[in-house]
Image: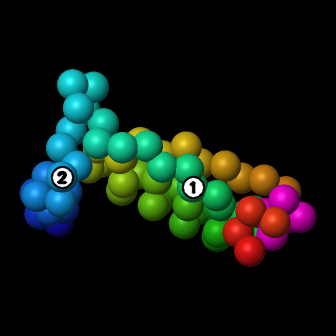
Amino acid sequence: NRGKAEKLLDQAGYPKGADGVRMTLKFVVPTWFVTTRQAGDVVKQQLEAVGIRVNMETPDGATSQRLIY
């Protein structure tokens, strides 16, 4: 649940800043399948709900392989 996640992040030393953001993550989501992109959108939405800004990148297949592996 969102409240528990926010409490755990606070306790771990990641409080929200004045802008409401705890940290920013680079999130590489390969576009091999439509469902992969959809799952990436869900993860981004859930992280942002607790104050984690997500810069999601959806590179082409070859670039995805290089960045992930």
Quadrant holding the C terminus? bottom right
- In three-dimensional space, the C-alpha distance between marks 1 and 2, rounded to whole angstroms, equals 21 Å
Q: Residue at (18%, 52%) from the top-left corner? A: 13
Pointer 1: what residue?
27
Label 1 or label 2, whichever lies nearer to me, is 2
Secondary structure beneath disc 2? loop
Expressed as whole percent of the image width and height from the top left, the position of residue 68 reads 70, 69
Magenta stretch: dominant secondary structure: helix
The answer to whether 43 appears left or right of 67 in the picture is left
Pointer 2: what residue?
13
Q: Residue at (67%, 49%) from the top-left corner? A: 57
Classify residue 34 by image quadrant: bottom right
Q: Label 2 neighbourhood size at 10 Å, few (<14), some (14-19), many (20+)?
A: few
Magenta stretch in the rendered image? 61-65
Expressed as whole percent of the image width and height from the top left, the position of residue 48 reads 36, 46
Expressed as whole percent of the image width and height from the top left, the position of residue 30 reads 72, 64
The answer to whether 62 appears left or right of 15 in the picture is right
Q: Is residue 3 visible?
A: no
Q: Residue at (64%, 69%) from the top-left corner? A: 36
